[in-house]
Amino acid sequence: MHRRIRLLTPVLIAAVAATVAATTHAGTTDHHDNPGARTTTPIQHLVVIYQENVSFDHYFATYPNAANPAGEPRFIAAGNTPSVNGLNDSLLAPNNPNSVQPFRLDRTQFETSDQDHAYKDEQAAYDHGLMDQFVEKVGRGTGPNGEVGGQVMGYFDGNTVTALWNYAQAFAMSDNSFSTTFGPSAPGALNLISGQTHGFTVDGNAVPAASQTVIGDPQPTGDTCDTRDHSASADPNNKNIGDLLNAKNITWGWFQGGFRETSGVTSTGATTTNTCLIGHKNLAGVFSNDYIPHHEPFQFFASTANPAHLPPSSIATIGKTDQANHQYDLSDFWTAVATGNEPAVSFLKAPGYQDGHAGYSDPLDEQQFLVETINRLERTRDWSNTAVVIAYDDSDGWYDHVMGPIVNQSQGVSGNDVLTGTTCGTRADPQRTLGAYQDRCGYGPRQPLLVVSPYAKSNFVDHSVTDQSSILRFIEDNWQTGRIGNSSFDSKAGSLLNLFSFRGDEGHDGPNMLFLDPQTGQKH
């Protein structure tokens, strides 16, 4: 009997069999105060860990082969590990078309420069699909021989991002998942929860007047921690997944490190009760605020915003609509879990120093957050029906050799589209520009995406095309919320279902859970 069958009751076995026949059906019942909320798979709890600024090649370029130098955590792949679309001999030195060759970043080089990841500059790095202008257009830091901008060609392997490689071995990952559009954190976060970046107030270069589309990193209007330019949704037709879940009375929440802290330390080392100033230093000694406003996408929508960072009115209301409006501190998630009140859908955002963003975070601090979070989730009573998705908001500009399909064109009305000269795409076809909304060129850069779950296929690599809004679509389909509408990318998003096995199929049978060491990423 396979591991996933062992997790099911006889009642659920029938529901799983129906899942195989059709992806939409009356499935299991969610038990969080809404007996009518039904899922189309056995997944009753989805936890999305949304990290920062990593391209696929930056973390998985040579997977599953690690250099294994002395003194670093070793990674030895299982014999049946599938290959990924990584950097083979045709793209490694001396054959890469970029002016600096790809090179391995040692574990001692965990602290790196933040690369340029602007909407326009990322397109320019692609050079009409030749993928050869990363150093010149988005590169920062130095290469292995001191080349200016050359650090953008660096990649880590399983001796640094050891935990992620071990999760990929035990569970499932994609090597063909992309940013929904080009650009930095705010567009990526908005695409995760709504699949749309259009219809926002104009705010300088971050939201060009000609398109009213978010292409930069404005902060959400009214957030008590705002420090600069800000923006909010101005299109009354814009919705996010929180609106859809609320309409179905399904519990959910966005839980972010530093959203509400009572005391902490500022960048100067002073003690403060101002939550907006509290932060931590990463392992390299770089300070960052725990809460970063433009990383909180629900704050951009009036319907789901909690601009004053109010706490939940009680533990029992976490996941439900009250004064917190589904926006919480990360500590509230664990309070809800400890009291048996984990929401059906939870988005977790690490405090700044652990979110993986180059410049103020790093792979080792990120690893500690990922491992501690997943180890803890695996010990909960709901783990048997939980799926964890690890995904990223943008690539940071790091080199990746794969150009994704352009499923949505943009005609360069703001002068920011340069993928194919002065536009993104060349076909004058209205059907290839969703809603005629501009500055939404995509798909953008390729990024890691992993699923950790008792229902994830084991040691599996999915090659089907997905994007950030595929996570949105999984929520819509699993909880039968319907689509966002108003030209959301969810209408084009590929499915995540190929990363799962709901029958315990032969060849996909692995561990129910995997406990790793937060410092080394190795198995306990």
Image: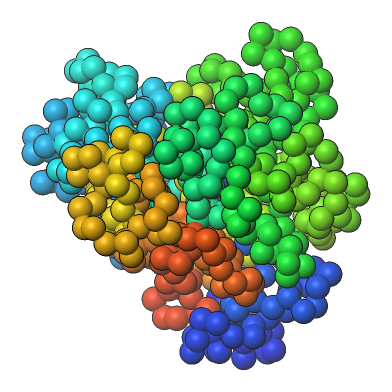
Q: Where is residue 341 shown, x and y percent of the image? A: 81, 59
Left or right for 170, reference 268: left
Taking the spot 66% from the left edge, 26% from the top edge, the residue there is 226
From this viewpoint, is residue 163 visible? no
Q: Where is residue 467 shown, x and y percent of the image? A: 41, 57
Q: Where is residue 113 shown, x and y percent of the image? A: 39, 22
Residues 490 and 361: in front is 490
Residue 285 against residue 139 in the figure, above or below: above
Left or right for 248, reference 400: right
Quarter the N terminus occupies: bottom right
Q: Where is residue 107 shown, x and y percent of the image? A: 39, 29
Left or right for 24, reference 381: left
Question: On the image, which quarter does residue 116 sit in?
Answer: top left
The residue positioned farthest toward the front in the image shown? 210
Taking the spot 58% from the left edge, 18% from the top edge, the residue there is 287
Taking the spot 52% from the left edge, 39% from the top edge, the residue there is 186
From this viewpoint, is residue 187 visible? yes
Question: On the image, which quarter does residue 379 sit in?
Answer: bottom right
Residue 365 against residue 433 in the figure, above or below: above
Residues 100 and 93: in front is 100
Colour scheme in use: rainbow
Residue 402 against residue 263 in the figure, above or below: below
Left or right for 267, reference 83: right
Taking the spot 12% from the left edge, 38% from the top edge, the residue there is 96
Residues 479 and 379: in front is 479
